[in-house]
Each structure stands twice: as C-alpha cells, then as structure tokens.
Image (cartoon, rainbow, N blue to C red):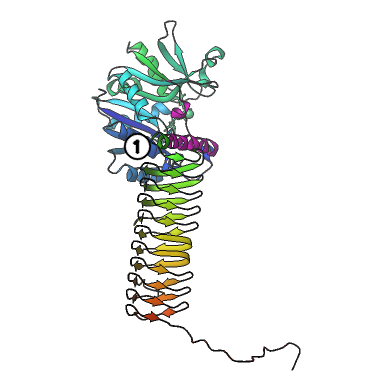
Amino acid sequence: MTGLVDVVVMAAGKGTRMKSALPKVLHKLGGRALAAHVLDCAAALGARRAVVITGHGADQVEPALAAHAEGLLPLQFVRQEPQLGTGHAVQQAMPVLDDDGVTLVLSGDVPLTRPDTLQALLSVCGGEHLALLTLDLPDPTGYGRILRDDGGQVRAIIEHKDASEAQRDIREIYSGIMAVPTRLLRRWLSQLDNRNAQGEYYLTDVVKFAVADRVPVHAHRIQDALQVAGVNSPAQLAELERGYQRRVADALMAQGVRLADPARLDVRGRLICGQDVEIDVNCLFEGEVVLGDGVRIGANCVIAHARMAAGAVIHPFTHIDGGTSGVSVGPGALVGPFARLRPGTQLGAEVHIGNFVEVKNATLADGAKANHLAYLGDATVGERVNYGAGSITANYDGANKHRTVIEADVHVGSNCVLVAPVTLGAGGTVAGGSTITKDTPAGALSVARGKQVSIPNWKRPAKGKG
Ligand code: UD1
Ligand code: MG
C-alpha cells in the first residue's frame, strides 16, 4: 500500500539541443508526446493527480497535455519563470500539493519508466522516507552522483559540476526520479539555496536535509538504463524510439504474435492481436488497430485506425487509414498488394480488394470483388458484386458527394464510370466502357457508350503531301 500519490512532472526546460520550434516534451515517441508517456505512467500508478511544471513553450505544452489527460487523470499546470533549477521547479508546485500524500517527481522528457518500477520506489518510500531511483552507469558524466557512507547509507547527491575527482569516479547516479512525503518535501524545499557551481536551486539538496533530519534515505537501484534515459537530442529520441518499439515487439511476441523481424516493426498507438497473427517486415501501425485470429499482414503495410476480422490477409504495400470513421475488414477478406482503404471502408466476409484499388466511405458486402485499378467512393456494394478493372464511381459533382448503390450480383465491366447518385439493379450487367448516368434495371445488360462503327479501307493521312 503506497497511499496517496501526487505526480510532479518537470517540463519547463528549453530542450535547446533538439533545435526545434516544438517544445521538447511534445516531441513524439511511439506516436505519443514524450510527456504523454509520463502522464500515462502516472495514471497507471493510480496517482491522485499530476502537476506539470511548464515554462518554455507553455502555451503549446499545456493544451496538448490537457487534451491527453482528459479522462485519464486530474491534471494541473504551474508555471516556472524564470527556470532557476529543479528545486525551484518543484517549489512552484508546492502550493497545489497536499501534505497528506507522497510526491513522485518525474521528468517530462524521460518517457520509458515502467509503472512497476515506480510502484517499487513508492513502496520503499512507504509514505515516510525519501526514496531515490538510482542506477550504475559505465559513463556517469554529467549526472548527479550518489554519496554513501561506510555503512552504505545514502548521505547526499553531488552534482557532476560540484563533484571532486574522487566523487566523479562514483558510478551510481541519481536518475532524476524521487518519491518523498509531501510534508517533508515542503520543509526541505524551503531550506534550499543556490550556492553551487551552477547557481541553481537543486532538488537533489533535499537528500542532505533528510539526512540532517534523520529521515531514512533509500536508493532503489535498477539495472535498466532505458527506464531513466532522457531525451535531449534527435539522436537520443531516435534511440529511445527503437528501445520503445523493441519493448512493444517483445510484448507482442510474448503473447504469441509472430513478427518476421522485431526490429522492423513500428507501433504508434495500440495494436491488439488475436491468436496466430503474423506480421511481415516494415509494417507501421497507428492509432488503435485490432487484428483478429489468424490475420496475416504482408511486408511494408501502413495501417491506421482499423479492425481486421479473423483470417483476413493484407498483402504487401497496402495503405489503410480509417481516420476518425475507421476501416473494418471482414473475415477471410483479401486486400492488396498495393491497395488503399480510406476512412469509412467496411468490407464483408471474403471480399477481395486487389492492386491499385482505392475504397473510401464504402461498404462491400460478403464476397464482393474489385480486383484491379478501381475506385469505389461513397458506395454501397451488394454481395458477390464483381467490379471491373478501371471502373470508378464519379461521386463528386464539384460541390456535393453522391452515393452509388450496386445491388447484389451485379457485374460491372472494365472502364465504367458510374455517375452518382445512381443505383444498379440486382443481378444486372454493365458493359465495359459504359458511362452510367441513370439507374439500371435488375437483371438487364446496360450499355452506355458510342456504338462501334468500322469504315472500310480507311486511308490514314500521309506526310509530305499537299
Ligand atoms: C538532474 C539532477 C541530476 C540527475 C539528472 C538526471 C538536479 C539538480 N540534478 O540533472 O542529479 O542525475 O537530473 O537526468 O536535479 N527543469 C525545469 N526547471 C528548471 C530546471 C530543469 O523544469 O529550472 C526540468 C527540465 O526540463 C528537465 C528536468 O527538469 O525535464 C531535469 O533537468 P535537467 O537540466 O535535465 O537535469 P540536470 O540539472 O542536468
Ligand atoms: Mg540542469
């Protein structure tokens, strides 16, 4: 039992090394802002609230994080201007924190800390002690070092710039994450000064005040550097992205998903898989994607906001984006290669969508097929319809979109233009090359094109005469 937890997220820093107009904590990792990962972690811990300290880019950071936190956990912002150090940052949050809880200090640019690690840190804190998350680094340059006494008890954190040569040899570093009873934190923060190499108010000075007050200080020492790695540059962002993707890939494989190569998968959202799902190399998933039992995804597919029923097969180089209305692919359907499914596409069972076919805001009932080079937009397509190569629905008159209804068992020949609004009656056939502007009767053959004529002995004009 860890009691009431208030998470304080430091996010006022500039992120100069990103060399970007976008505030650092809004840069994306796995499709979510860095600071959104931290808020998700706070929510997973069951935190009572999160308080985000903003400064640089606050006008951008606050609305973005408020939108992310909606329905996730209560969120407040406090501003720190100017930025006088990490201790000064947390001081800004004290007015909105209550003394009955524990404050968990996190950084908005450290996205990959696991909730179970923080839970363990909170247990060590136990609502009464100061708990520091630490780890040993082969190269601890730049970090605060953990100073211990002969008995191994933590005595202080010394910042790299303030450390002696001997202290700089210490490999155990402070991660930037601590859990501390709020009432004690309040007292210690009021004692901070900025007499140090950087002229900053160091949060890390609370350790020596805890020692002076005989409050036990515990280091929760972990091994996994990824969990405390911060993002300062595009190179570090890319490195953490790979670390994150590897974690996602490992979790999918542990659950039985067969990935051709876990290093060549990108999930920028949530990928939910049934049993016996296979995913080939270089696939990118965005938003929520649900793959039913036995679904196979070919190489080089981009799939966003979509659901595939059991046994659906997506062939290589297919692009699916459900946007806000979603895409659903029925059981046993075959899509691609080189197909494009846009928002509002709903494919029934065993539907076939072949190469260079684009579908938008259209429903295809069971067994319908559009196998080559076609466009179906704003259409309702019946069961077993066969839609020929090169045919399109002309759904847009320049101002409004209109619907095309193709009833069950219709065959549409190649290179037809179906000018919406129009309905093709059940079982009918449309001759290749037709431009259909009027409804067609059920069961009929409809032909709408110039009649073929042949002029005998036709002489082509010749060059160099007359
Ligand atoms: C801090 C720790 C150091 C630790 C390291 C881990 C202090 C004094 N030192 O170092 O012991 O090893 O983190 O990464 O705490 N921030 C603000 N306002 C400020 C200053 C910083 O919001 O005035 C934010 C930054 O945006 C960042 C976080 O606090 O998210 C940490 O600041 P940073 O400058 O990266 O940490 P260091 O001082 O280098
Ligand atoms: Mg600093």
Judging by the rendered image, the residue that carries numbered circle 1 is: 40
Q: Is residue 374 above or below residue 61?
A: below
The x, y position of residue 345, in whole percent, is: 37, 60
Residues in magenta, as a range:
222-250
In depth, the one of 152 and 419 nearer the eye is 419
In the image, what residue occupies the spot 44% across and 28% down? Answer: 228
In depth, the one of 387 and 248 nearer the eye is 387
> From where the camera sits, is residue 457 visible?
yes
Q: Is residue 317 left or right of residue 351?
A: right
The x, y position of residue 281, in whole percent, is: 51, 44
In the image, what residue occupies the spot 30% across and 30% down? Answer: 45
In the image, what residue occupies the spot 43% across and 42% down? Answer: 26
Instruction: Please identify the dominant SS of the magenta region.
Output: helix
The x, y position of residue 162, in whole percent, is: 51, 19
The N terminus lies in which quarter of the figure?
top left
Place residue 93 in its image quadrant. Answer: top left
Amino acid type, label 1:
Asp
> From where the camera sits, is residue 395 visible?
no
